[in-house]
Image: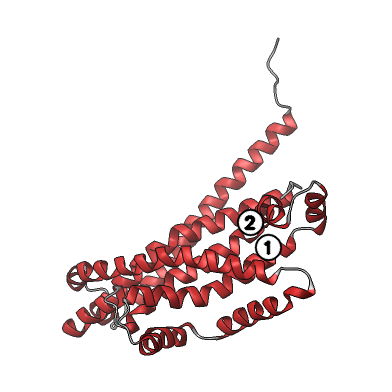
C-alpha cells in the first residue's frame, strides 16, 4: 500500500500558512523593537530617569528590605490560606440559603440577600477597621491579628463568592433538577451530585478572579498592626527614605498572582473553545 500523499491544493495551503506564520513572527519582532526604542527615548534616556531609578529601583535597598518583607509576606500567605477555606464554606452556605425554594424560607433568603448586599457595598478597609479595632473592644479580649484579618476577609469576600456560586447554581437548567428528583434523589443529593458539578464549570473563571483580588487585599491587614509585607516595607522605607521596599512587596504579590491569572486565562480559553466546538459544558 502506498502512503497517502497530500494534494497540490493542500500543499499550497500549508505553504501559505507557514508563510503567514513567518510574517507574523517578523512583524511581532519589529513591533517589539520599535516599542523598546520608544521606551528608551521617552523614559530611560531622560534626565529624571536616574532619580526614579534611585528612588524606586535601588538594588542595595531592595536586598536590604527583602528579608523583612519576605517574613511579613509569609503572614499574608497565612491569612490567605485560611481565608480560602473560610470563604469557600461561608459563601457556599450563603449561596445555598439564597437558592432555597418555598415561602417558608423567605426570611432566610432575605437575611442572605441582605448580607451579600451589605458586604459587597462596604469598602474592605472599613470592614478591616470595624473588625480589627471594634471586635476586640466588644469582646474585651486580645485577638491575634491573623484571626482578625481572616474574619474581615471572610466577611467581605464571602459576599462576592456567594453571588458567583448562586449565579452558577441558577445557570443550571431546571430540567436537571427535575430529572434528578425523578430518579429519587433528595434536595441535598441533587445539589451535590447534579447541580454543583455543572455549576462549577461555569463559575470557575469568576471565582479565580475573586481569588486574585483576595490575594491583593490581604496586604491591607497591615493597618491592624500586623507585621506583614507592607508593614515590613514601610519600616525599611522609613529608615532609608526610599520607596524600593514597597516595590519589592508589590513584586512578591505580583509573583503570587501570576500563576492564578495564567490559569484563569487558560481555563477561560478552554471553555470558549469547547463552546465554539459545540461541546457539552
**Other residues around mark 2 within 10 Å, as few (<14) / some (14–19) / many (≥20):** some
If you read the primary sequence from the N terminus, does the residue marked by circle 2 or circle 1 appear first?
1
Indicate the position of residue 196 as horizontal and vertical percent values: 66, 56
Question: Mark on residue 168?
Answer: 1
Question: Mark on residue 46?
Answer: none
Q: Quadrant of residue 143?
A: bottom left
Q: Quadrant of residue 76?
A: bottom left
| Residue 111 visible from this viewpoint | yes
Image quarter in which the N terminus is found:
top right
Which residue has dot 2 on it? 200
Residue 199 vertical position relative to residue 105 in the rendered view, above or below = above
- The residue lying toward the viewer, choosing from 102 and 98, is 102
Q: Secondary structure at mark 1?
A: helix
Indicate the position of residue 52 as horizontal and vertical percent values: 28, 80
The answer to whether residue 210 is left or right of residue 12 is: left
Q: Alpha carbon of mark 2 to alpha carbon of mark 1: how far?
A: 7 Å
- The residue lying toward the viewer, choosing from 185 and 169, is 185
| Residue 244 visible from this viewpoint | no
Q: Secondary structure at mark 2?
A: helix
The answer to whether residue 185 is left or right of residue 155 is: right
Q: Residue at x 63, y 56 (%)?
A: 200
Q: Residue at x 62, y 54 (%)?
A: 269
The answer to whether residue 140 is left or right of residue 113 is: left
Q: Residue furthest front?
A: 104
Q: Residue at x 64, y 68 (%)?
A: 95
- The residue lying toward the viewer, choosing from 211 and 87, is 87
Residue 13 vertical position relative to residue 201 in the rendered view, above or below = above
Indicate the position of residue 75 as horizontal and vertical percent values: 31, 69
Indicate the position of residue 105 as horizontal and vertical percent values: 73, 74
Contact (Cβ within 8 Å) of mark 2 with mark 1: yes
Amino acid at each position: 500500500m502506498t502512503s497517502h500523499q497530500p494534494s497540490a491544493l493542500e500543499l499550497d495551503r500549508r505553504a501559505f500558512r507557514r508563510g503567514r506564520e513567518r510574517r507574523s513572527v517578523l512583524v511581532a519582532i519589529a513591533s517589539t523593537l520599535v516599542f523598546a526604542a520608544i521606551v528608551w527615548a521617552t523614559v530611560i534616556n531622560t534626565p529624571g530617569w536616574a532619580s526614579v531609578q534611585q528612588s524606586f529601583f535601588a538594588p542595595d535597598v531592595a536586598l536590604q528590605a527583602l528579608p523583612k518583607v519576605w517574613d511579613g509576606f509569609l503572614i499574608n500567605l497565612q491569612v490567605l490560606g485560611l481565608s480560602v477555606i473560610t470563604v469557600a464554606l461561608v459563601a457556599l452556605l450563603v449561596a445555598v440559603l439564597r437558592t432555597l425554594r418555598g415561602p417558608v424560607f423567605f426570611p432566610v433568603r432575605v437575611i442572605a440577600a441582605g448580607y451579600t448586599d451589605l458586604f459587597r457595598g462596604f469598602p474592605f478597609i472599613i470592614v478591616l477597621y470595624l473588625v480589627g479595632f471594634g471586635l476586640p473592644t466588644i469582646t474585651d479580649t486580645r485577638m491575634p491579628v491573623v484571626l482578625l484579618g481572616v474574619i474581615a476577609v471572610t466577611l467581605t469576600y464571602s459576599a462576592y463568592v456567594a453571588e458567583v456560586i448562586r449565579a452558577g447554581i441558577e445557570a443550571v437548567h431546571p430540567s436537571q433538577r427535575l430529572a434528578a428528583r425523578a430518579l429519587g434523589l433528595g434536595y441535598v443529593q441533587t445539589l451535590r451530585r447534579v447541580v454543583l458539578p455543572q455549576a462549577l464549570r461555569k463559575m470557575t473563571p469568576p471565582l479565580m478572579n475573586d481569588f486574585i483580588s483576595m490575594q491583593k487585599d490581604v496586604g491591607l491587614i497591615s493597618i491592624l498592626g500586623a507585621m506583614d509585607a507592607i508593614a515590613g516595607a514601610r519600616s525599611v522605607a522609613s529608615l532609608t527614605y526610599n520607596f524600593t521596599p514597597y516595590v519589592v512587596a508589590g513584586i512578591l504579590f505580583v509573583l503570587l498572582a501570576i500563576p492564578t491569572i495564567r490559569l484563569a486565562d487558560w481555563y477561560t480559553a478552554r471553555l470558549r473553545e469547547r463552546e465554539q466546538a459545540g461541546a457539552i459544558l
